[in-house]
Amino acid sequence: MYFIENRNQMRSEDRNRESFTFARKKRYLAMCCEIIQREACSCAAQSENIIDLQFISQGYHDLESGDMSRRLQEHIANADKSRYEAIVMGFALCNNGIVGLKAIDIPLVVPKAHDCITLFLGSKERYDEYFNANPGTYYLTSGWMERDSDNLVKMENTVMSKLGLDKSYEQYVAEYGKETADYLMETLGGGLEKHYDKVCFIDMGVVKSDFHREQARKEAEKRNFKFEELKGDLRLIQELFDGRWNSGDFLTVHPGESIKPSYDCSVLKCGCEVNIH
């Protein structure tokens, strides 16, 4: 009898709890390249804000910049913007892949960065300093090693596919003959050795990195590259999610504005959309 009465009392308390009111946290939709998935999940968990995560295929980077921008704009247009204060973009300029993105109804916020390496190192300044002192460096993180472009919906839209450069050696031999296939593979496969002489593994501290570190080291040894490891910095991603958007590190795009390249050290700027009748 006591158990039944106690359970009824608990049910009554549960009903009363429905009338509780809590201070509302800010809620952001984070659209992020899947390359930063581990890092984004870690920062979202640490943020006081409510972060709804949406990960976008890394393969978008293999599209022409206009195709990448159009696909991202579709994601922005389809978002339920009534739920959010802003859409925060876990992307960089990425070969102009975000140029032209328009804010609809709510602001877009994006880091002022040329590429994801800035996000992994924590600032444009740190990346610039290392880049200038270490030209010819190929950067790796766990995300770059784990993710690829195979999950694009239409692989025929990639730049490599449009150029006919997405086939295996055997496919080239069958279509063009061995001599041409050898030339293509030498030209394409030799690209890293022509432009790089070092592998830099960036340890972001969000996953046990022994496996990824050794894989990166083996790739460096295989190509006779130097190997170096850097400690990553989550500052930019964390501040993006926390809503701490200083104008030096972040671009805030208000409704009616779009993302433009600035062609200077600020990387990005806002442009106003003009309707021509």
Image: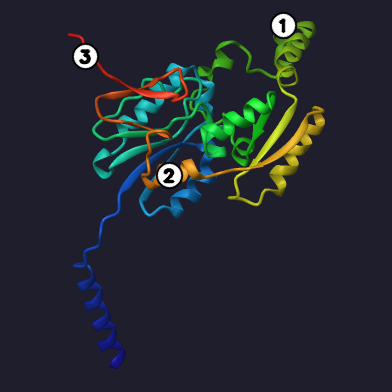
Residue 233 in the image: state x and y as whole percent.
56, 44
Judged left or right of residue 86, residue 63 is: right
Residue 151 in the image: state x and y as whole percent.
53, 31
**Amino acid type assigned to the residue bearing label 3 in the image:** Asn
Whether residue 265 can be seen here: yes
Whether residue 53 can be seen here: no
Judged left or right of residue 146, residue 245 is: left
Residue at (70, 40) in percent of width and height: 229
Local crowd size for mark 1, using a 10 Å CA cut-off: few (<14), some (14–19), many (≥20): few
Q: CA distance from mark 2 to mark 3?
A: 34 Å
Q: Quadrant of residue 251?
A: top left
The residue that mark 2 highlights is: 239
**Amino acid type assigned to the residue bearing label 1 in the image:** Tyr
Residue 44 in the image: state x and y as whole percent.
44, 49
Asked if labels 1 and 2 touch by Cβ distance under 8 angstroms, the answer is no
Residue at (60, 43) in percent of width and height: 232
Q: Secondary structure at mark 1?
A: helix
Asked if labels 1 and 3 touch by Cβ distance under 8 angstroms, the answer is no
Q: Earlier in the sequence, mark 2 or mark 3?
A: 2
The residue that mark 3 highlights is: 275
Q: CA distance from mark 3 to mark 1?
A: 49 Å
The residue that mark 1 highlights is: 176
Residue at (29, 34) in percent of width and height: 107
Q: Secondary structure at mark 3?
A: loop
Q: Earlier in the sequence, mark 2 or mark 1?
A: 1
Judged left or right of residue 86, residue 93 is: right
Local crowd size for mark 2, using a 10 Å CA cut-off: few (<14), some (14–19), many (≥20): some
